[in-house]
Amino acid sequence: MSKIYLAGRSSDTKIGKLLKKFSGKVNVYPPGTCPLTVQLSLLQASKNQTCGKCVPCRDGLPQLEQLLSSILNGSATMETLDEMKNLAIMIRDTADCAIGYQTAIELLEGLETFHIEYVSHIQKHTCPENIGQKIPCVTLCPAHVDIPGYIAHVNNGDYADAINLIRRDNPLPTACAMICEHPCEERCRRNLIDSSLNIRGIKKYAVDQIAADKVAVPRANVSTGKKIAVIGGGPSGMTAAYFLSLMGHKVTVYEAKERLGGMLMYGIPNYRFPKDRLDEDMRAILSTGNIEVKYNVNVGVDISVEEVYHSYDAMYVAIGAQVGKKLRLEGVDAKNVFSAVEVLDQIGHGNRPDYTGKVVSVIGGGNVAMDAARSALRCGAAEVRIVYRRRQEDMTALDTEIESAVMEGIELMLLQAPKSIESDEEGKCTALWVQPQMIGPYDRAGRPAPMDAVSKAPERIPCDVVLIAVGQDIVSAPFEEFGMPAERKVFQAGLDTAVENMPGVFVGGDCATGPSTAIRAIAAGKVAAHNIDEYLGYHHTLDCGVTAPEAKPNNRVPTGRVNIGERPAYIRKHDFEHVECPMSHEEMLQEAGRCLRCDVYGCGKLEGAVEK
């Protein structure tokens, strides 16, 4: 008996290793893959898992596979779609276990989501023209930077060429090297061998070797005589200003504060992104020569939106989301209760609060909450707690930021919904009351929603300071009064960033999407610049003067990923100095050498693959 048991365990272990490889292949399906092919793969995987006990799953899934295969091989008709739908509904409603009914549910969702693709396969026997395998990292980068190309330059030691190739699509290489959330790594094909490249780390190595403002920007085109106003000197506004300037247009940036950078300057603490490094990107952008900056000018307050609009040939609104959202909470007006965004803004201005010996509670689960909590610790707080109403896996903050906060001694109080703030006779905060939660069904956003754990009594969390980090808001009123449409303060525009029925007005970044990432704001600025150029009657193309070097043979040896280290937590938590340690030359060579050059091997040349 024991031998049979051990043999079974050995077989399961081997299968487990095989399934790990299988899941890796699923995770790196490249962008642009035919969705019907993906659905067929998932359907076949489910069919292979059936136990065979119930007819709907045992016989129904193979029939669905045959029908879907007939669509892919060109032998199906439009009636096939109805047959698939009816069969999937039957399996959904009658299968005994999740292998059957969940597979049917997913197929039904696919029939609706990919209806155009299904029809195209039936009528034209092919995918729509927009479907085609793409380079994963380039496609998933919102700005579509030539990542394999600049990694190859870094590997060759050509750091200036790497920076210029990045700036062809993203004029803030230093900012993204420091704080980008690197979506480009999600489907890196290196995962088929070991793990994804540390793309951000390689970029950081390049800008650590030579500052961005020491690398000459491309020469601007001849002057067009056109003038564009850019409202907001954050990542989106400065990206648009950079490209418009190189196109030959005269750009005037209206910045409400005394320095450029927006939330990069005033929302991200120095320990994550030293401000002198941000200045390197800004100086490089201004070196294009066609950009004038009007500092400390708040459009809508110091000058009307209408006056700006009528003074220029086009206007790009990129004001970001720079104020904290309020929380409807009893006692929220007590003393020592602050917006985390405003506190970070004050720290960015050099006005650090003194929390010496105090207990600080931070409400929220995003990157702003992590920044506020870690900053409070550096401002002398004796204890810092992050209070969040969901689970840790539901937090929107980066896993690395959560891990760093915990390593620095910050406590995560999870599944605790803020209920009220207690204060003393002087109106000072003394405690945060919370209601324990339990996680429940998924909400419309696709996240499991918390709900009150009614059997658990509210709990009191003693604290001296409460920082509220539940989101950021947009100061949209002056622009709405001007006539720009907004929904819940988010400006409405088309995919081309143009505002409907307002000729020459474009919007982008957080004020057009809601709070998002720096790289998405940069991408919006790039798109807006090209669309403004088209609106003005031009079609400029820009040459960065650099192309990707010739690809070397792939290194196929499984090798561990090089992660960027940080200074020890017991040291770094007491100061605002940069926490990350530089990557060594040997580490860079190893990491850059792992790139599989998907722009050459497997996907074809990059030229023409990325739309501007």
Image (cartoon, helix red, strand yellow):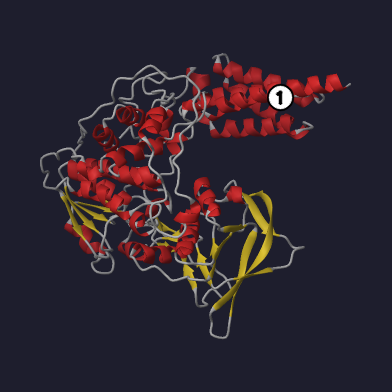
User: Which residue is drawn at the image coordinates 28% and 55% (left, top)?
Assistant: 233
* Total marks in image: 1
Q: From this viewpoint, is residue 492 visible?
A: no
Q: Residue 490 versus residue 468: which sits nearer the camera? A: 468
Q: Answer with the quarter of the image where residue 459 lies.
A: bottom right
Q: Position of residue 240 (x, y in %)?
A: 26, 47
| Amino acid at dot 1 | Thr
**Which residue is most to the bottom?**
425
Position of residue 317 relative to residue 458, above or below, is above
Residue tagged 1 = 13
Q: Residue 341 versus residue 498: which sits nearer the camera? A: 341
Q: Residue 30 versus residue 273: which sits nearer the camera? A: 273
The answer to whether residue 130 is left or right of residue 411 is: left
The answer to whether residue 282 is left or right of residue 487 is: left
Q: From this viewpoint, is residue 180 visible?
A: yes
User: Which residue is drawn at the image coordinates 82% and 24% (left, top)?
Assistant: 53
Position of residue 366 relative to residue 83, above or below, is below
